[in-house]
Amino acid sequence: MRIAHYTVTTALLWLLANTVAACSMAISDSSRIAVAGGSLTEIIYLLNAQQRIVALDTTSNFPAATQSLPSIGYVRNLSAEGILSMKPTAILGEDDMGPPEVVKQLVAAGLSIAKVPEVYTPQGIIKKVRCVASLLQLQTQAEALITSQLQPVITTLNNYQRDHKPLKIALLLGLRDGVPLAAGSNTSGDGFIKMINGHNVFASIEGWKPISLESMASANPDYIIIPQRGVDTAGGIDVIANHLAVRLTNAGKHQRILVLDGMAMLGFSPRTLTTAETVLQQLQKTRVLNQRSTIDTQTPVKVGS
């Protein structure tokens, strides 16, 4: 029993020693990084450390230069063999990196793994940037980025929230078997709605949930936001706009449907901040148009690509 206990304890300590506690210390060797998470990839590029990346997951599709790098699978369904074949010195992943058994295999193989915490707020993005920078020992670059590019956008977002009343917004991921799938509380969608000074009409539910016709009509959002991928999967913007659940709402009646790049909106990278700023500019424009009663009611509003 003592031998078994010693073996298990030793194994656990060894695993802990080879797993980096995110943000608390630098990765000992970050010369060859495999990245699992599009937001982290974007941050590494902004920190001008992309030369360290040897492989990426499939959500890492921005900037365009990422397309030339080898893939290690989807962030929640990584391939241990694919990662190990790239001979990385460390793995940097978002907090939902997985599956757990693959992560265990990688740790057992001696790789340092850092999971970066996710908080769906502007300050959460700042903390994510600082975390990645700390792990890669690029704190000076990170502070320059935050001061020059990120904080001014956050100030704009805060000023808008101070000066405007929240709008009723529903964020749909798309249609699942013809049923709208909406962002409830504790989702990236809910975080984005709050970022653009919106009231999430489905905040009373938790997670991403299918929404009935009755629930959509009762919630009656003034605006609907949907990622481009959701529009494409559904068969186009006309399919979304003409869906009965959408047509029952003020958003549908006035064609106030915003189509955004999904990763830019929901990835909670620095691009999420600039996407939110762009949306606020569009919302401000439609507010003015509504006051003049000249809003275009034929074409859904589209922001981004």
Image (cartoon, rainbow, N blue to C red):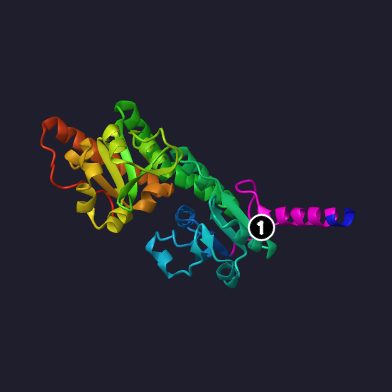
193 horizontally vs 57: left or right: left
User: Regarding mark 1 in the picture, which secondary structure is present there?
Assistant: loop
Picture quadrant of residue 184: top left
Write the residue at 53% across / 46% down.
Answer: 130
Residue under the point 51% across and 59% down? 49
Q: Amino acid at mark 1?
A: Ser
Q: Residue furthest right?
A: 2
Quarter where residue 218 is shown: top left
The span shown in magenta is 5-31
Horizontal and vertical percent position of residue 242: 19, 48
Residue at 46% across, 69% down: 69
Within-10-Å neighbours for mark 1: few <14, some 14–19, many 20+: few
Q: Is residue 204 above or below residue 224?
A: above
Give the position of the C terminus as an image quadrant. Answer: bottom left
> On the rendered structure, is 235 left or right of 299?
right
Q: Is residue 169 magenta?
A: no
Tell me: 264 left or right of 5.
left
Residue 152 in view, yes or no? no
Q: Is residue 80 visible?
A: yes
The N terminus - image quarter: bottom right
- Pick the front one: 50 or 282: 282
Instruction: Please state the horizontal and vertical placement of residue 271, each as a whole percent of the image.
Output: 39, 49
Which residue is rendered at x = 56% and y = 62% of the image?
33
The correct choice, above or below, for 236 with respect to 298 in the image is below
Q: Is residue 281 above or below residue 84?
A: above
Residue that mark 1 sits on: 28
Instruction: In this rendered view, identify the residue nearer to me: 150 or 250.
Output: 250
